[in-house]
Image: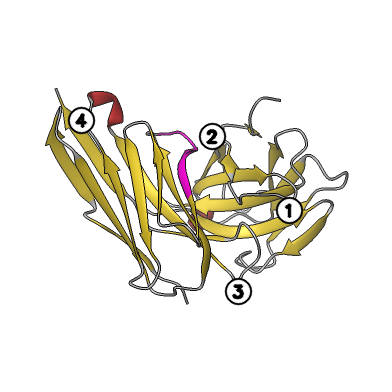
């Protein structure tokens, strides 16, 4: 059974610092990995999607890397802002599972202080 | 519509009652998913529809849970004889047809169910 772990569970940084969020998974037979953002009481917003053949994806201040062989992904957020405060979740889709059947980590709760 | 729409946003019910949660996916998205999120946890997969049929219902916890999508668009998640342990946020997501699909899921804001 795929296990997805996110460390740390919570993180607090001052505005302007770079954020590094980690995600690890036990089964490397994935077809993609997605990073989501969740604000309190809200649904999930897709941030970045990395296909299994890719090593990284970038969007603005966000960069996500993927190392399938070691079962790890890292989300970098440059020059953090208070508006980046949210819970960040990673999710993987297994090639042996139905399309869109994602395994989620429990998330990293981020607070960016002004 | 512009995004995935879920109703109701909040539902409070009593133990033993029947509940229906509705999901209206993004127009043109043939794949629809239901997930359940408990407090402090990531979402857990419940069921996946491709068109009108349930392609994978392996995540439904027991036979009190049932979902339909009769016309291949709107879906309803039905929970019979609700229990306090069913309290959670029920999330719906949709994605584009398989051909050329990147696999990106688009989520609604969820229906928060509280069973007293």
Magenta stretch mostly in which secondary structure?
strand
Q: Residue furthest right?
A: B71
- Please name the residue that numbered disc 4 is placed on: A79
Given this view, does label 1 or label 3 mark the residue nearer the observer?
A: 1
SS class, disc 2: loop
Q: Are the residues at dot 4 and dot 2 in contact (C-beta closer than 8 Å)?
A: no
Give the quarter of the image for residue B4. top right
User: Please, which chain is the residue tagged with disc 3 on?
Assistant: A
Q: Are marks 1 and 4 on the same chain?
A: no
- Please name the residue that numbered disc 2 is placed on: B109
- Please name the residue that numbered disc 1 is placed on: B98
Dot 2 or dot 1, earlier in sequence: 1
Q: Residues within 10 Å of mark 4 (few under 14, many from 20)?
A: some
Given this view, does label 2 or label 3 mark the residue nearer the observer?
A: 3
Image coloring type: secondary structure
Q: Which x, y percent locates residue B94?
A: 66, 44
Q: Are marks 2 and 3 on the same chain?
A: no
Give the quarter of the image for residue A63. top left
SS class, disc 1: loop
- The Cα atoms of the two marked residues, 4 and 2, are separated by 28 Å
Magenta-drawn segment: A41-49
- Please name the residue that numbered disc 3 is placed on: A96
Q: Are the residues at dot 2 and dot 3 in contact (C-beta closer than 8 Å)?
A: no
Q: Which x, y percent locates residue B62?
A: 64, 68
Q: Nearer the viewer, residue A76 or A57?
A: A57
User: Please, which chain is the residue tagged with disc 2 on?
Assistant: B
Q: Residue at x 34, y 38 (%)?
A: A62
């Amino acid at each position: 059974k795929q296990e997805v772990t996110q460390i740390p569970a919570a993180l607090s940084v001052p505005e302007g610092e770079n954020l590094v969020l980690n995600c690890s998974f036990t089964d490397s037979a994935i077809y993609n990995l997605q990073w989501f953002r969740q604000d309190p009481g809200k649904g999930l917003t897709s941030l970045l999607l990395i296909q299994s053949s890719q090593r990284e994806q970038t969007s603005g201040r966000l960069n996500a890397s993927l190392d399938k062989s070691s079962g790890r992904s890292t989300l970098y957020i440059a020059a953090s802002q208070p508006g980046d405060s949210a819970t960040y979740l990673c999710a993987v889709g297994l090639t042996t599972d139905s399309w869109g059947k994602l395994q989620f980590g429990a998330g990293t709760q981020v607070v960016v202080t002004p | 519509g512009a995004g995935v729409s879920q109703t109701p946003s909040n539902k409070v019910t009593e133990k033993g009652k029947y509940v229906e949660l509705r999901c209206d996916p993004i127009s043109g998205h043939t794949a629809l998913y239901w997930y359940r999120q408990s407090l402090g946890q990531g979402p857990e997969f419940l069921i996946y529809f491709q068109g009108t049929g349930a392609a994978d219902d392996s995540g439904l916890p027991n036979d009190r849970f049932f979902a339909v999508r009769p016309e291949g668009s709107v879906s309803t998640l039905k929970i019979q004889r609700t229990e306090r342990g069913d309290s959670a946020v029920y999330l719906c997501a949709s994605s584009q047809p398989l051909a050329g699909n990147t696999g990106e899921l688009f989520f609604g804001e969820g229906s928060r169910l509280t069973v007293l």
